[in-house]
Image (cartoon, helix red, strand yellow):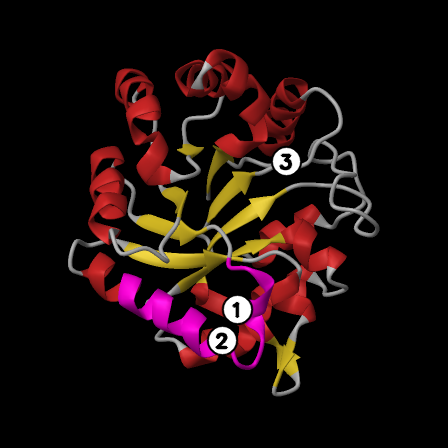
Amino acid sequence: MRSSVQLWTLRDAAAADGLDAVVRLVARAGFTAIEPFALAATVDDVAPAVRELGLEVPTAHAELDTEDLDAVFDAAERLGTRTVVQHMFPAERWSTEGLAVTAGVLERAAVAGAARGIRVAVHHHDDELRTQVDGRPALLELADRLGREVGVQVDVNWAALADLDPVDLVKTLGDRVVAAHLKDGPGTGANDEQVALGRGRLDLDGFLTVLPTDAVVVLSLDAYRGDPVEAVEASRAWLDERGVR
């Protein structure tokens, strides 16, 4: 099982020093892979350090609801990325009426990506799990409407905040889970109560156990109150203890 860091975790450092410096910081912390955000817009900033340091970019977040999918997949090919993840859809796209539009966006992107050997997936927050369509979470209804070529990136914390068991969610989705966002926290309350891996109450060991062995585990502290650099370093040590490289 591979691990990486979602660069949005260090967005404040990126704003101050640039994404190139952040990629190098992640490498110094012991990670050998990254997950960029806004792929088409940031590829020029991350590509030089990725190439120089020999980092992997197995997954990347991007906007797939766009007329210019070529720009997205060009950027993915440049970084050697084989899975491009839709970062989010607005809440209304998970309603009964909006789900057909959401499915259409992902189907179109999946066809375009497959022609270039790239898989697409969707990342979820809590809206996708709280919203019910035909009596079940909208994310699961969406998965059933799509071909299995469209993957899911499960977020352990967002699932918990939506009052779902993240372990059960992974079991339900099975091999559709191509990647996971790993973070820790109390499992209740607000999303901004995140902590470094192993310092919260989420069952991360159980979560890792049920993930497909080829899934990419991505550290994603998207709303961390403390020093995110220290959290990245502490989380790297936690992953090392579990043999997750």
Q: Nearer the viewer, residue 227 or 95?
A: 95
Residue named by callout 2: 99
Q: Give the numbered dot on residue 93.
A: 1
Q: Residues within 10 Å of mark 1 (few under 14, many from 20)?
A: some
The x, y position of residue 12, in whole percent, is 59, 22
Q: Which segment did they paint magenta?
A: 89-109
Q: Amino acid at mark 1?
A: Arg
Could you tell me which residue is drawn at 52 percent across and 81 percent down? 97
- Is residue 161 located in the magenta-colored stretch of the structure? no
Q: Nearer the viewer, residue 89 or 174?
A: 89
Q: How many marks?
A: 3
Q: Give the numbered dot on residue 186.
A: none
Circle 2 SS class: helix
Name the N-terminal-most of marks 3 and 1: 1
Could you tell me which residue is drawn at 27 percent across and 56 percent down? 67
Q: Give the numbered dot on residue 221.
A: 3
Circle 1 SS class: helix
Is residue 57 visible in the rendered structure shown here? no
